[in-house]
């Protein structure tokens, strides 16, 4: 029974990554055959609405907030950003490939960290190993993004011959790859902004396999599987789509993954420290009887820290869930 409980989230996350990469590959094929990216976005969102709206009304009826003006403004802003994210994301896939799109998605933690520091939602302490890990991971992710976009290097794997491809066509493909990389970079930045705003409004009502896995195992477990999408997209692209795997793109993807896990380690370690601090403060409150005024001040301090930690955990959950979108 225990092994089954552990195995189910693993299977769920693998299937979730396969579904995400599959959607990217289908979108690339549809747009290559002449379908507009805007039309594809309309069809995919219409289908998602037909599936998710009934589920939301059935299972989340008691969790719907009052439709105040501020909530409606938040919905509009999130919807606008979500639409722009999809427009830039699918345009980037059209000009490049699903492999580059899955690699660029791993930049979201880095950009979210940058925005959180800029907006003072995160405190950058140079003496802390977690802050250093997040900073180094952010820099590594950005360096990897430039490498995977601008540097090809020798080819490693290919199911099609490069000798029949003219230099002019190769140059055209490279320019398209750079354009796609830039669009996907903008997509990652917008996704990070979307995460920040959704933490502000607290209006995440997402359902799906990734949400179930997040509930069962936590955000760190879910995010650990994100680089798996790169492996799946590379394998499918080389075997079925005739793409060429270049050394530079492989190195760039590896650097992005290293940066991703560095930022992830920093966030996970900070969350554990906050949790241990709250637990120790709560236990000390129960074991040491103090004066009533002192107890009230102490409990107020614990509640503030607990509230901050819960907000941080909520922000982290939204942050990792947003990585699931293009």
Image: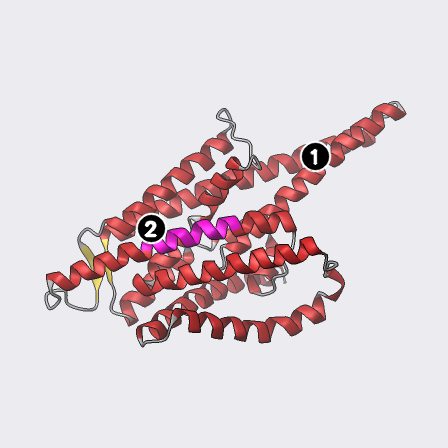
Residue range corresponding to the magenta coloring: 181-193
| Residue density around tag 1, few if under 14, some if 14–19, many if 20 or more, within 10 Å | some
Work out which residue is located at the far front of the displayed protein and give it.
Answer: 69
Structural distance between the alpha carbons of marks 1 and 2: 37 Å
Depth check: give the residue in front, 77 or 27.
77
Residue 191 among those drawn in magenta = yes
Query: Where residue 163 sits: x, y (%)?
Result: 10, 65
Q: Residue at x 66, y 74 (%)?
A: 54
N-terminal label among 1 and 2? 2
Depth check: give the residue in front, 23 or 235.
23
Please name the residue that numbered disc 1 is placed on.
Answer: 305
Q: Residue at x 42, y 54 (%)?
A: 187
169 with respect to 262 (left or right) = left
| Residue density around tag 2, few if under 14, some if 14–19, many if 20 or more, within 10 Å | many
Query: Where residue 252 sits: x, y (%)?
Result: 30, 48
Work out which residue is located at the far right of the displayed protein and give it.
Answer: 292
Please name the residue that numbered disc 2 is placed on.
Answer: 253
Q: Secondary structure at mark 2?
A: helix
Q: Secondary structure at mark 1?
A: helix
Depth check: give the residue in front, 202 or 222.
202
| Helix, strand or loop: magenta stretch | helix
Q: Is residue 9 above or below residue 150?
A: below
Depth check: give the residue in front, 91 or 224.
91
180 with respect to 163 (left or right) = right
């Amino acid at each position: 029974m225990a092994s089954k409980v552990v195995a189910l989230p693993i299977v769920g996350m693998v299937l979730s990554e396969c579904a995400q990469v599959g959607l990217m590959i289908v979108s690339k094929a549809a747009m290559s055959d002449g379908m507009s990216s805007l039309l594809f976005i309309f069809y995919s969102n219409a289908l998602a609405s037909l599936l998710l709206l009934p589920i939301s009304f059935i299972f989340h009826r008691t969790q719907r907030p009052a439709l105040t003006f501020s909530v409606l403004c938040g919905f509009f802003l999130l919807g606008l950003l979500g639409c722009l994210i999809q427009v830039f994301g699918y345009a980037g896939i059209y000009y490049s490939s699903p492999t580059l799109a899955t690699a660029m998605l791993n930049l979201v933690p880095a950009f979210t960290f940058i925005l959180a520091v800029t907006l003072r939602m995160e405190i950058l302490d140079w003496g802390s190993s977690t802050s250093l890990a997040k900073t180094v991971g952010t820099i590594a992710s950005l360096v990897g993004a430039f490498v995977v976009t601008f540097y090809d290097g020798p080819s490693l794997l290919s199911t099609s011959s490069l000798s029949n491809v003219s230099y002019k066509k190769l140059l055209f493909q490279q320019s398209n790859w750079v354009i796609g990389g830039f669009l996907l970079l903008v997509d990652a930045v917008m996704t990070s902004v979307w995460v920040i705003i959704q933490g502000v409004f607290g209006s995440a009502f997402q359902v799906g396999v990734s949400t179930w896995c997040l509930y069962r195992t936590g955000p760190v477990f879910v995010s650990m599987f994100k680089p798996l999408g790169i492996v799946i997209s590379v394998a499918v692209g080389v075997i079925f789509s005739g793409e060429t795997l270049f050394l530079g793109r492989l190195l760039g993807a590896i650097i992005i993954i290293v940066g991703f896990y560095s930022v992830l380690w920093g966030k996970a370690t900070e969350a554990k420290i906050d949790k241990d601090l709250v637990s120790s403060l709560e236990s000390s409150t129960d074991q040491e009887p103090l004066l009533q005024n002192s107890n009230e001040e102490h409990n107020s301090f614990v509640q503030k820290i607990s509230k901050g930690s819960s907000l941080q955990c909520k922000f982290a959950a939204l942050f990792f869930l947003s990585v699931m979108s293009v």
